[in-house]
Amino acid sequence: MKLLAIVGTNAPFSYNRFLANFIAKRYSDQADIEVKEIDQLKPFCRTDEPDAVTKQWIKDVKNADGVIFTTPEYDHAVPSSLKSAMEWLGAHAGSNAMKMKPAAVVGTSYGAQGASRAQEDAREILHSPDMSANVLPGNEVLIGRAANNFDKETGDLTNETYIKQLDSMMANFIKFVEQANK
């Protein structure tokens, strides 16, 4: 099973990059999980053709069995770079890469709510008619106070409560992907 863990920001430092890498490392015995950056993607414009980097992004998502989006929260929403990256995957962009693609959303933020609004924003985008993704229901992992819950040297998530929540979500997502790809 091939999964992508998307770093949902173009920021040079991000706890969501730590989260994506932690997911890839911790669950490597259950799936081939590649961490995918969005920092080199061209901003979405409906009238522009995708460049080579963006074409590869679309191809990688199309070829994945499932996609895990890790998102920070900026002003109660996903970062503009993540929104733009997601827009390249929709039917309106001609790629239709997310149609019925199994997807999960997780996130971490500096605040106590753990990117809750951004995660909801990402799910709404993925459910939109132009995306029509197959989003894992009922599995929220809201990692608040990111600076206190990740080891800054290793990037590992250190909070056992959040790790257990992530373990449960990933077990459910792997089953979800298996069922969707039968």
Image (cartoon, helix red, strand yellow):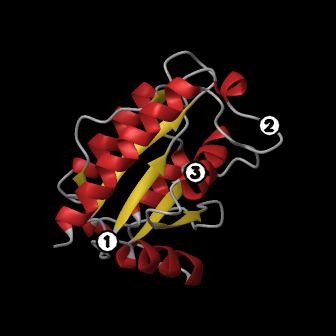
108 vs 33, nearest the viewer: 33
Which image quarter is the N terminus in? bottom left
Q: Position of residue 146 (x, y in %)?
A: 65, 27
Residue at the image point whose x is 57% and y is 67% from the top: 42
Circles 3, 1 touching at the beta carbon (< 8 Å): no
Q: Give the Cα distance between marks 2 and 3.
A: 14 Å
- Residue at the spot of label 2: 152
Q: Earlier in the sequence, mark 1 or mark 2?
A: 1
For residue 155, the mark is none
Query: Tag 1, which secondary structure?
Result: loop
- Residue at the spot of label 1: 97
Q: Reply above or below: 25 against 113.
A: below
- Residue at the spot of label 3: 20
Q: Position of residue 175 (x, y in %)?
A: 26, 56
Q: Position of residue 168 (x, y in %)?
A: 37, 39
**Observer able to see residue 60:** yes
Identify the amino acid type marked 1: Ala
Query: Tag 3, which secondary structure?
Result: helix
